[in-house]
Image (spheres, coloured by chain):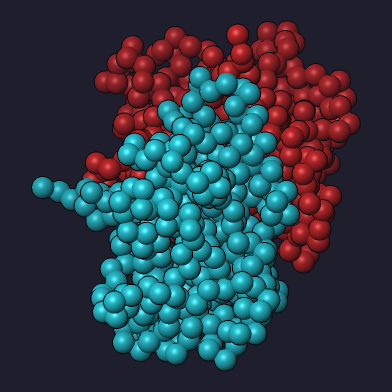
Chain colours: A cyan, B red
C-alpha cells in the first residue's frame, strides 16, 4: 500500500520539506548562516542591517481550529495571536500581518465584518498593523496569516542554543486552554458544579488566547535566554523541539513538582477523571513560551518577567520527567499532532 | 434577508477590509506614506533602508484553482508563480517564499513529495529560496504562499501613478490560459481537430503558467513605468484597478486592433464559438503585466523588453474600448471574481 501523509504525521512532513529545500537555498546578502538555520525554527529570518526581519505563516481551518462556540471576533483574534506567538518565540516585535481568507459563499457579511474586527482587535493589542488582505472562495472558513516582525541580530531567540546546566522555564501556568476545551467538548462535565471563576478562566484561554509578545521581546533584550519556542502543541512536544534542535546533544529533565499547576486545571481535570499532567504535557494552544537560561541569570531576569522553573538541561540527550513519587520516567515528545492517525 | 459575502463579491470584500484597517495602521519607521498606501496594492511595502521589502500572500484551493488535469508538481509551481507575479507587479526581485499547506488525510505521500518538488522547481526558476513551511490537516488541498521580495525605493511600481497621455501596454499576448481552460473544460471542443502546437501552447499557459519576474524587475529599474499590476483576473478588471487607484481621475481607452491576438487563442475561440476578445478581457490567469508608461519613453524601453501597446491613458475617468468597427464602447471592469453569484 502506498504511504499516505497521515502515515507519517505533521512533524515528519515538515522535516521532509526542510530536507528537500536545504539544497535549494539561494545564498545572498539577505540570508546569512543564522537566517538559513532559521528556516527550521518558528519563523524565518532575513538580514536587515543590524536587525533581522522575522516572517512566519500559519494557516487555520474552521473544522480543526475554531470550535462552534468561538465568535467570529475570537476567530479573527486567534489568527493574529497564533502568528504573533511564533514571533514572540524568536523575541521579535510584531510589525504587521497579511491575511488571506477563504470564505464559504453562504457566510454572512456581518460575520465577515466581525472576523475582520477581531483581526484588527488583535492588531491593536499587539501594537501592529493589518498590512494586506486577500479573499477567495472555499468550502470551509480558512484563514492564513503571515506576520512580520523585527528583532536585533544579537537578541534573536532560536531553538538550538541551550547548554547543559541551563534552567528550563515557562512564562506561565499550562493546561488552561486544555481545561477550557474539556468544558466545551467533554459531555461528562457538569457545568453547574464548576467554580464559576475557574470556568471563566479556562474558557478564556480556550476561546480568546493571548500571545506572550511583550515577554518575548523583553526576554530577547535581556540577552540571557539560550533557547526558546512557543507552546502550541503541548509541553512534551515543544521540549522535544529544543532537544532536537540542539547541535550538542543536550537532554532535558523536568520535575512534576515544579510545574505550575493552576487550581482551574486541577478542578477540571478531577471532574473529567484525567491527570492534570496530561493537559500540560500533551495538549496545546497555551501560547506560553518555553525557554532555557543560564543558571546564574535566572534570578535577575525572573525578577523582571514572571518565569516558572520546571526543569534543567542535561548532557544526556534524553527527555525525562521526575514524578512526584521520585521516579524518573522517559518523556515522549508527542503532542497534539495534525495528520496523524 | 441578511447579506452574504457572495452578495457583494471578492473585490468589495477586500475594499471593506482596507477601509476598516486604515484607522488601525501603526505609524513607525517601518511604514512610510508609500508603504501605507501599498496596503491596497498587489503587495505590502516595508521600509528597508534605501529599499522596500515587499510581502504578498495568496491562498489557493484545490477545487477553485487546480483542475484535476494539473499534476502535483504543476500545483506547487503555480503557487510560487501566483505569488511571484504579485511581486513582479511591484517590480520586486523575489527572495523567498513561506508555504503553509492544508492536506487531506488521504493524500498520498508521493503526491506530497511531488507538490514540494514543484514548489522547489518554482523557487529555482525564480532564483529564490523556500524559507519556511507548515502543514495542517484540511478537507481539501489548500496552499497558502507568502512571498518576500526587494525593490529600490525609487523603482517600486504602484497601481496609482499613471498620467493622461501615457501609453497602456502589456508584456505579452493574453487569453492563452483561457484558451487552455476551454480545452480542459469545454466538452464541445474536438481535440483531434486542433492544431497540435496550439493545443500545447494553450495547455502550458493553463497548467504551467509563468510569472514575468525578470521583466518586472527590469521595468522597475528603467524608471519609465508610471503604474503597473499583474493580469490575474482578466484585462478589463485589471484596467479597472489602475483607474480606481489613480488619485487624479484618469481614464483608460484600449483599441481592439492593438491587442496582441495569438493564433492559438483565435483557433480555440472559433472552435468553441466565442469571441476571442472575451478570453482576453474577462478571463484571468495570464500572469502578464499591465502597465502605463510615458509616451516619450515607450520606444526606448520596448527595445529592451517586449511590450505591446494596447491603448492610452485619458483624463476622462472612463474605461472604454474602441472596437475594430470604430465604435467606442464602455468597458466594464468585471473579470473572474470569486464569491460572486
- Residue B222 in sight from this viewpoint: no
- Seen in the picture, residue B323 relative to A70 is either above or below; the reply is above
Q: Is residue B118 left or right of residue B98?
A: left
Image quarter of residue B320: top right
- Seen in the picture, residue A50 relative to B292 is either above or below; the reply is below
Q: Picture coordinates of residue B237 (x, y %)?
A: 65, 25
The residue nearer to you, when weighing B169 against A313, is A313
In this figure, what is the number of numbered marks? 0
**Farthest front residue?**
A193
- Seen in the picture, residue A256 relative to B59 is either above or below; the reply is below
Image quarter of residue A218: bottom right
Q: Is residue B99 left or right of residue B239?
A: left
**Farthest left residue?**
A1
Q: Residue at x 78, y 65 (%)?
A: B50
Q: Is residue B63 left or right of residue B87?
A: left
Look at the image and tell me in which quarter the N terminus of chain B lies.
Answer: top right
Q: Residue at x 38, y 77 (%)?
A: A255
Q: Residue at x 44, y 56 (%)?
A: A265
Q: Picture coordinates of residue B290 (x, y %)?
A: 66, 36
Q: Picture coordinates of residue B31 (x, y %)?
A: 78, 55
Q: Picture coordinates of residue A302 (x, y %)?
A: 62, 78
- Residue A126 in sight from this viewpoint: yes
Look at the image and tell me in which quarter the C terminus of chain B lies.
Answer: top right
Q: Residue at x 63, y 62 (%)?
A: A213
The residue nearer to you, when weighing A334 against B303, is A334
Amino acid at each position: 500500500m502506498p504511504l499516505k501523509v497521515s502515515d507519517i504525521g505533521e512533524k515528519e512532513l515538515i522535516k521532509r520539506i526542510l530536507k528537500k529545500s536545504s539544497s535549494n537555498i539561494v545564498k545572498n546578502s539577505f540570508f546569512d548562516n543564522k537566517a538559513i538555520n532559521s528556516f527550521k525554527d518558528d519563523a524565518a529570518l532575513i538580514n536587515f542591517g543590524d536587525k533581522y526581519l522575522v516572517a512566519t505563516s500559519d494557516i487555520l481551518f474552521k473544522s480543526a481550529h475554531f470550535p462552534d462556540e468561538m465568535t467570529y471576533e475570537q476567530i479573527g483574534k486567534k489568527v493574529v495571536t497564533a502568528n504573533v506567538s511564533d514571533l514572540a518565540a524568536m523575541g521579535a516585535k510584531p510589525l504587521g500581518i497579511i491575511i488571506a481568507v477563504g470564505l464559504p459563499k453562504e457566510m454572512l457579511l456581518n460575520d465577515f465584518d466581525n472576523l475582520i474586527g477581531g483581526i484588527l482587535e488583535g492588531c491593536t493589542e499587539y501594537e501592529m498593523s493589518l498590512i494586506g488582505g486577500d479573499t477567495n472562495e472555499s468550502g470551509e472558513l480558512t484563514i492564513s496569516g503571515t506576520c512580520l516582525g523585527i528583532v536585533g541580530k544579537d537578541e534573536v531567540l532560536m531553538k538550538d542554543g541551550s547548554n547543559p546546566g541551563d534552567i528550563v522555564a515557562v512564562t506561565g501556568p499550562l493546561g488552561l486552554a486544555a481545561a477550557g476545551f474539556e468544558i466545551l467538548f467533554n459531555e461528562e462535565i457538569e457545568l453547574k458544579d464548576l467554580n464559576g471563576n475557574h470556568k471563566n478562566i479556562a474558557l478564556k484561554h480556550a476561546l480568546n488566547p493571548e500571545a506572550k509578545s511583550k515577554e518575548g521581546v523583553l526576554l530577547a533584550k535581556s540577552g540571557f535566554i539560550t533557547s526558546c519556542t512557543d507552546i502550541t502543541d503541548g509541553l512534551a512536544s515543544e521540549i522535544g523541539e529544543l532537544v532536537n534542535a540542539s547541535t550538542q546533544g543536550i537532554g532535558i529533565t523536568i520535575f512534576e513538582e515544579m510545574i505550575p499547576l493552576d487550581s482551574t486545571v486541577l478542578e477540571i481535570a478531577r471532574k473529567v477523571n484525567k491527570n492534570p499532567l496530561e493537559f500540560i504535557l500533551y495538549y496545546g494552544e497555551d501560547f506560553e513560551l518555553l525557554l532555557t537560561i543560564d543558571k546564574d541569570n535566572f534570578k535577575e531576569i525572573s525578577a523582571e518577567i514572571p518565569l516558572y522553573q520546571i526543569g534543567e538541561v542535561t548532557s544526556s540527550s534524553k527527555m525525562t520527567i521526575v514524578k512526584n513519587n521520585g521516579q524518573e520516567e522517559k518523556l515522549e515528545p508527542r503532542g497534539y499532532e495534525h495528520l496523524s492517525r
